[in-house]
């Protein structure tokens, strides 16, 4: 039995020999619980504001007038809430993901005869979009075009499939979106379940590169890897005068670090006291249904001849099938496009060495676990780093902060366009969404203990940039020449994708003009 079929719930298992499969889920495959047991069931009535006060506003995705839904519930309102099980309580098999019998999500639908006068609830009431000229305000305009759902089966702790089945699908159904092509009965969408590491890039090439004349919205149930796969599956970036359509992406953060999502929604997180407010998934759903699109800034990372994409550090085998050969070069690559981070040193090693089944089941905690092992070794990375600053035409050697020295060994070299690599790990506090500025964070051979102090300071809102050992500046481009003998220390990271550079080879990172994708934000 294949990996995909083992992971997918029995209610919608379907398999073809193609690399990319549009899977149409059977109706009523998903259930919504508490006040209703299915998305098409009649919800129980809560008739007064005292009852509504018991609802957790942070869990509410949206509210619909009951007359605008397919649920026969009379007047009033339907309140859709996402209930999440703590990741620590989910039993996860090292290879297959979440157990089919254990459900990490519940979608609760509550019927209320009226809503209290609450500004927060009013902001969650749909529709909030102008009509399309035919009197229809639902679904939102960006979901009325050519809409595709991509479910990444291996992202994070592998919760994308149950999230689609139990949460996203009934929400789309409530807004009049049905799985399948658009018909006279309403708006449609297609679903792609990833089968391997090529699925999303193949999708981008087929749907987003060969035909750029249609408006498309891609709903991505994945982590940062899904975004970088889309970016690299698309052809060259389009200039602003280009008349072709630029796809819009809605991100539902089901990966490990979810750096891009957290960075784009940092202002939204800031509206709430620490530890309060909607979860990342609730915020992602709200953004999907009520957000606006903005151009996603990107960078281009170029590599010297012989650079190779690298898989996980250890083989991943299940039932005799090799999902990832582990540590072997997959193919040569001369460049990648990114939107988050390009790194060499401790960060790149951490991302690569934590990408094993044993670490992945721990979600974002995997980084801390792998970091402990790396810091024990306290390896200093032998490299030459050069930068090109604004107004300069040539690269110049990087001067390390504190010592005023050029050259030497490094522990950390990281170029980024975003503020956060995790929700609470602020690597570049000056970075703002959509500004498109590349910033470099770096420090030399400071030892394992000091490296840990610097990382801990980054978890305190980015205080590491105030430390005398840490350099932090705006750059136009960065070049890293890698001089290590051991291939283990010659890995670079581009938005979570690992590339191995030959000894004496290099990585160059520069900002990219034009646009490849737009992204939905709150």
Image (cartoon, rainbow, N blue to C red):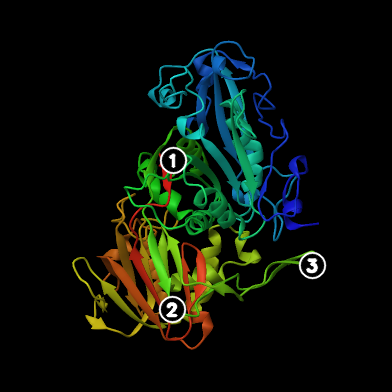
Judging depth in this view, the residue of 42 and 479 nearest the camera is 479
Which residue is pictured at 38% across the width and 39% down the height?
A: 272
Measured as percent of width and height from the top left, residue 342 is found at 41, 67
Disc 3 is placed on an element classified as loop
Measured as percent of width and height from the top left, residue 250 is found at 48, 43
Measured as percent of width and height from the top left, residue 163 is found at 62, 42
The dot on residue 320 is 3
Cα–Cα gap, marks 1 and 3:
45 Å
User: Which quarter of the rendering shows the N terminus?
Assistant: bottom right
Measured as percent of width and height from the top left, residue 127 is found at 46, 23
Q: Are marks 1 and 2 in contact (CB under 8 Å)?
A: no
Between disc 1 and disc 2, whose residue precedes?
A: 1
The dot on residue 276 is 1
Cα–Cα gap, marks 1 and 2:
46 Å
Residue picked out by circle 2: 304
> Relative to residue 422, is residue 326 depicted above or below?
below
Which residue is pictured at 63% across the width and 48% down the height?
A: 159
């Amino acid at each position: 039995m294949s990996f995909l079929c083992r992971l997918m719930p029995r209610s919608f298992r379907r398999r073809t020999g193609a690399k990319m499969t549009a899977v149409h889920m059977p109706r009523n495959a998903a259930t919504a619980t508490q006040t209703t047991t299915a998305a098409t069931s009649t919800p129980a009535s809560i008739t007064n504001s005292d009852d509504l006060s018991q609802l957790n506003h942070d869990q509410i995705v949206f509210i619909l007038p009951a007359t605008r839904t397919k649920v026969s519930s009379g007047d009033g309102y339907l309140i859709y809430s996402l209930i999440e099980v703590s990741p620590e309580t989910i039993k996860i098999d090292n290879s297959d993901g979440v157990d089919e019998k254990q459900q990490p999500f519940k979608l609760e639908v509550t019927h209320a005869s009226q809503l209290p006068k609450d500004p927060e609830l009013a902001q969650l009431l749909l529709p909030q979009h102008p009509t399309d000229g035919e009197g229809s305000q639902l679904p939102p305009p960006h979901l009325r075009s050519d809409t595709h759902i991509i479910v990444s089966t291996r992202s994070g702790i592998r919760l994308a499939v149950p999230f689609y089945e139990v949460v996203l699908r009934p929400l789309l159904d409530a807004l009049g979106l049905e799985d399948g092509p658009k018909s006279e009965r309403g708006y449609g969408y297609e679903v792609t379940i990833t089968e391997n590491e090529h699925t999303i890039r193949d999708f981008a090439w087929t749907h987003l590169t060969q035909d750029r004349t249609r408006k498309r919205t891609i709903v991505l149930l994945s982590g940062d890897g899904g975004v970088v796969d889309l970016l690299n599956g698309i052809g060259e970036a389009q200039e602003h005068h280009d008349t072709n359509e630029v796809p819009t992406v809605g991100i539902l953060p089901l990966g490990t670090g979810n750096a891009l999502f957290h960075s784009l929604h940092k202002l939204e997180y800031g509206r709430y006291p620490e530890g309060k407010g909607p979860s990342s998934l609730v915020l992602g759903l709200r953004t999907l249904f009520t957000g606006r699109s903005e151009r996603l800034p990107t960078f281009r990372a170029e590599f010297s001849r012989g650079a190779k994409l690298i898989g996980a550090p250890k083989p991943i085998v299940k039932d005799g099938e090799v999902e990832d050969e582990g540590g072997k070069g997959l193919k040569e690559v001369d460049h990648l496009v990114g939107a988050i981070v390009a790194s060499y040193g401790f960060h790149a090693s951490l991302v690569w060495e934590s990408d094993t089944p044993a670490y992945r089941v721990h979600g974002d905690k995997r980084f801390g676990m792998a970091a402990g092992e790396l810091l024990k070794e306290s390896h200093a990375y032998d490299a030459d780093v050069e930068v090109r600053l604004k107004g300069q035409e040539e690269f110049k050697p990087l001067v390390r902060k504190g010592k005023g020295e050029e050259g030497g060994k490094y522990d950390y070299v990281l170029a980024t366009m975003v503020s956060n690599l995790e929700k609470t790990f602020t690597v570049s506090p000056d970075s703002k969404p959509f500004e498109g500025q590349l910033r470099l964070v770096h420090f030399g051979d400071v030892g394992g203990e000091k490296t840990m102090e610097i990382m801990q300071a980054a978890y305190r809102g980015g205080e590491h940039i105030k430390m005398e050992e840490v350099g932090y500046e705006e750059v136009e481009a960065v070049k890293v020449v890698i001089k290590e003998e051991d291939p283990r220390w010659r890995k670079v990271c581009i938005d979570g994708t690992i590339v191995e550079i030959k000894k004496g080879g290099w990585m160059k990172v520069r900002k990219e003009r034009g646009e490849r994708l737009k992204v939905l934000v709150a």
